[in-house]
Image: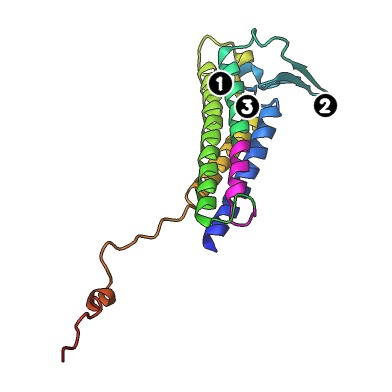
Amino acid sequence: MANSGIQLLGFFLSLIGIVGLIIGTILPQWKMSAYIGDNIITAVAMYQGLWMSCAFQSTGQLQCKIYDSILQLDSSLQATRALMIVGIIVSIAGLGVACMGMKCTTCGGSDKLRKSRIAMTGGIILLVGGLCAIVACSWFAHNVIRAFYNPYTPVNTKFEFGAAIFIAWGGSLLDVLGGAMLAASCPRKKQVSKYPSMGSSRSGPPSSTKEYV
């Protein structure tokens, strides 16, 4: 019963994590304008994401533009895109595999040990997907930090972390946590004793003595 509860908890954590990954990937607030130096008061706030850049004006108007060409983008941004997409696809596949092996589902056969192994496999796939997303977010954050502290970067073009990268980070961590709980839910095999039991050792072979007249 406890094993089934761990599987359910891991499944829902991974599901929430995948939703967070999708939302974080779509949102454009991966990095936003940094208000430092002479750039404290500005009429326009700039946001940049994986798919578009947006400008939020003080009047409340938001204008976004999708990136025209993939080849014109920075190589790190292309790699972040690819890792996030791979992480989402792999996590969805792992969630489907884990669903087949959970005790509360009827698909995957009636063998409990086999179903637990399927759930463990799904948890490992979820771990791989979550790690891909963590690498993507951390790589993007490293580039933002490096550009921020670069003395040759103009003050009005410096960016800091936006809300989307924190959503993606949180989703990836939930994905990894749920995958770890599913991967750890596989029961151990019962150890069969190599030595015969005491009762069987005491009871010897049937007597073959015969009575002689």
Q: Which amino acid lies under the numbered mark 3 shown in the image of this protein?
A: Ile
Q: Earlier in the sequence, mark 3 or mark 2?
A: 2
Residue 82 as seen in the image, left or right of residue 61 = left
> Disc 3 marks which residue?
85
Q: Which amino acid lies under the numbered mark 1 shown in the image of this protein?
A: Val
Residue 106: x %, y % from top left: 65, 54
On residue 144, the disc is 1
Judged from this view, the residue extending furthest toward the bottom is 213
The residue drawn where x is 67% and y is 22% is 49
Q: Which amino acid lies under the numbered mark 2 shown in the image of this protein?
A: Gly
Q: Is residue 42 above or below residue 103?
A: above
The residue drawn where x is 82% and y is 26% is 60
Disc 1 on helix, strand or loop?
helix
* Front residue (pair 116, 176): 116
Q: Is residue 136 above or below residue 122?
A: above
Q: Nearer the viewer, mark 3 or mark 2?
A: 3
> Disc 2 marks which residue?
60
Q: Give the main secondary structure, helix, strand or loop, of the magenta stretch.
A: helix
**Image: magenta residue range:** 92-106
Mark 2: few/some/many CA within 10 Å (<14, 14-19, 20+) = few
User: Per the image, is 102 magenta?
Assistant: yes
